Amino acid sequence: MADMNVTPLVDVMLVLLIIFMVTAPISSYPIDINLPQPTLNPPPVDKEPPPPVSLVIDASGAVTWDHTPMPMSQLESVMRQTVQRDPTNQPRVEIDVNGQAQYEALAKVLAYSKNAGMDKIGFVQHDQ
């Protein structure tokens, strides 16, 4: 007889499948997530959002804040001033990073924006 008997193999695989099905729910654990709750009365929109601020990081790591060249050392203070104008209605900062720029420049910009209290940060993507 040249055929292989696969019945024991199928039996072993079914037993393993049952074992995994029984033990999988035990090994999972819940993750606490704070989801927003629905409200019947949404908060009123008082103000129009300010126009977005363009922040460009070129290949050399130089920063341009709203079409104005800016040294990296002054960037955090400019961000703080922008936030302090109206902390509840901040402009969105649109970060455009050159693909050849060092990651360190982007990391500094993100750290400065976090330290300044900026809430609305976005990245600009260019199709290539």
Image (cartoon, rainbow, N blue to C red):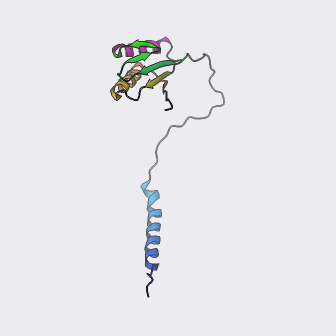
Residue extent of the magenta highlight: 73-87
Which is nearer the eye, 92 or 30? 92
> Horizontal and vertical percent for residue 17?
46, 67
Quarter holding the N terminus is bottom left
Please name the residue shown 35% across and 22% down the image: 61
> Horizontal and vertical percent for residue 123?
47, 27
Q: Would you say residue 117 is visible in this rendering?
A: no
Which is nearer the eye, 115 or 23? 115
Residue pushed farthest front?
Answer: 128
Q: Quadrant of residue 38?
A: top right
Q: Is residue 85 magenta?
A: yes
Q: Is residue 97 magenta?
A: no
Residue pushed farthest right?
Answer: 40
Residue pushed farthest bottom?
Answer: 1
**Eyeballing the image, is 55 above or below 10?**
above
Please name the residue shown 47% across and 63% down the image: 21
Q: Is residue 93 left or right of residue 106?
A: right
**Eyeballing the image, is 1 above or below 76?**
below
Q: Would you say residue 112 is visible in this rendering?
A: yes
Please name the residue shown 43% across and 20% down the image: 56
> Horizontal and vertical percent for residue 23?
44, 61
